[in-house]
C-alpha cells in the first residue's frame, strides 16, 4: 500500500473558496427529505431519497467555476445559472429520466419527478434566506440579477471545511436546525397527519 509522504503539505486554499457562502449540505438535504415525506410519501424509496438529496445539493457544484477563474458575480459563477428556476426544472427532469432508466420495471411515477424538481428548486430558495454571499440568479436566463428574500435569518456557511468544524460551523448548524430543521419537521407532521386522515377515510 502506498504511504502518504508526511513532508507533503496538502493545499486546501482553493478548496476553501469552493465552500463559500452556501447554506450547508445538511440544510439542503433536510429540505428535500422533508418535501418527500410531506408531499410524496408514496414515492419514498432509498433511490428517490438519495436522488432528491443530490438534487438539493447539486446547484452548489457550481463552486467548480472558481477553479476555472469564473468570478462569483458572473451568471456562470457561484449562485448564478444553477440557482435558477429554469435549471431546477431541467435538472430535476433529467434526474427523473435517469431514475426511470434505473428502475427495472418502469414503476416510477411522474410525482417523483415533481419531487426532484422541487428539491432542486429548494436549494436557491434556501440560499436566498442566508445572510451572506451574493444573491441567487433565480430568474436566469431572463434576468441575471442576484436576489435575496427580504428576510434572511439563516446563517451563511463557512468559507472552509475547517471553518465548519469550528464555532462558526456549530452556529450554522444551530441556525439551520432552527430555521430549516424545525419547519421541516412541522411540515412533515402536518402533511402526514392530513395524508393519514385522507387515506383512512
Ligand atoms: Zn447554493
Image: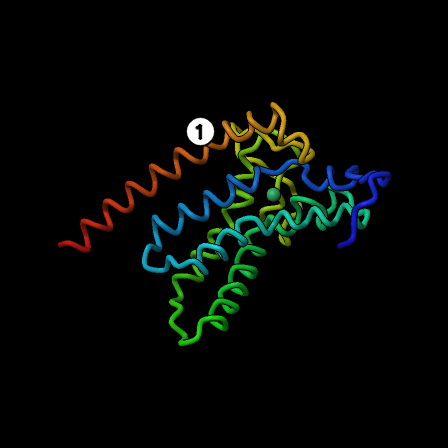
Q: Position of residue 91 (x, y in %)?
A: 56, 60
Q: Position of residue 166 (x, y in %)?
A: 63, 26
User: Looking at the rendering, in which quadrant would you find the C terminus?
Assistant: bottom left
* Ligand 1 within 8 angstroms of badge 1 C-beta: no
Q: Position of residue 121 (x, y in %)?
A: 51, 50
Residue 151 visible, this angle? no
User: Looking at the rendering, in which quadrant would you find the N terminus?
Assistant: bottom right
Q: Position of residue 61 (x, y in %)?
A: 65, 50
**Which residue is painted at 62% across and 53% down in the image?**
142
Q: Dividing the picture into quarters, in which one does residue 20 lie?
A: top right
**Which residue is painted at 58% across and 56% down in the image?**
87
Ligand 1's image quarter is top right
Residue sitting at the far right:
7
**Tag 1's secondary structure?**
helix
Q: Nearer the viewer, residue 31 or 71?
A: 31
- Residue 155 is left or right of residue 17, and the answer is left
Amino acid at each position: 500500500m502506498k504511504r502518504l509522504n508526511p513532508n507533503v503539505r496538502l493545499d486546501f486554499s482553493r478548496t476553501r473558496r469552493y465552500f463559500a457562502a452556501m447554506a450547508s449540505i445538511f440544510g439542503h438535504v433536510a429540505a428535500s427529505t422533508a418535501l418527500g415525506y410531506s408531499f410524496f410519501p408514496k414515492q419514498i424509496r432509498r433511490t428517490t431519497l438519495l436522488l432528491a438529496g443530490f438534487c438539493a445539493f447539486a446547484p452548489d457544484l457550481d463552486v467548480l467555476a472558481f477553479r476555472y477563474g469564473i468570478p462569483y458575480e458572473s451568471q456562470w459563477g457561484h449562485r448564478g445559472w444553477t440557482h435558477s428556476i429554469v435549471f431546477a426544472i431541467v435538472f430535476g427532469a433529467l434526474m427523473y429520466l435517469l431514475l426511470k432508466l434505473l428502475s427495472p420495471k418502469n414503476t416510477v411515477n411522474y410525482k417523483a419527478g415533481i419531487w426532484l424538481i422541487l428539491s432542486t428548486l429548494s436549494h436557491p430558495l434556501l440560499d436566498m434566506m442566508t445572510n451572506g454571499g451574493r444573491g441567487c440568479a433565480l430568474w436566469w436566463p431572463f434576468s441575471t440579477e442576484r436576489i435575496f428574500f427580504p428576510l434572511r435569518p439563516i446563517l451563511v456557511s463557512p468559507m472552509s471545511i475547517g471553518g465548519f468544524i469550528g464555532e462558526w460551523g456549530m452556529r450554522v448548524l444551530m441556525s439551520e436546525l432552527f430555521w430549516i430543521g424545525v419547519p421541516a419537521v412541522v411540515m412533515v407532521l402536518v402533511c402526514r397527519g392530513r395524508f393519514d386522515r385522507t387515506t383512512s377515510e
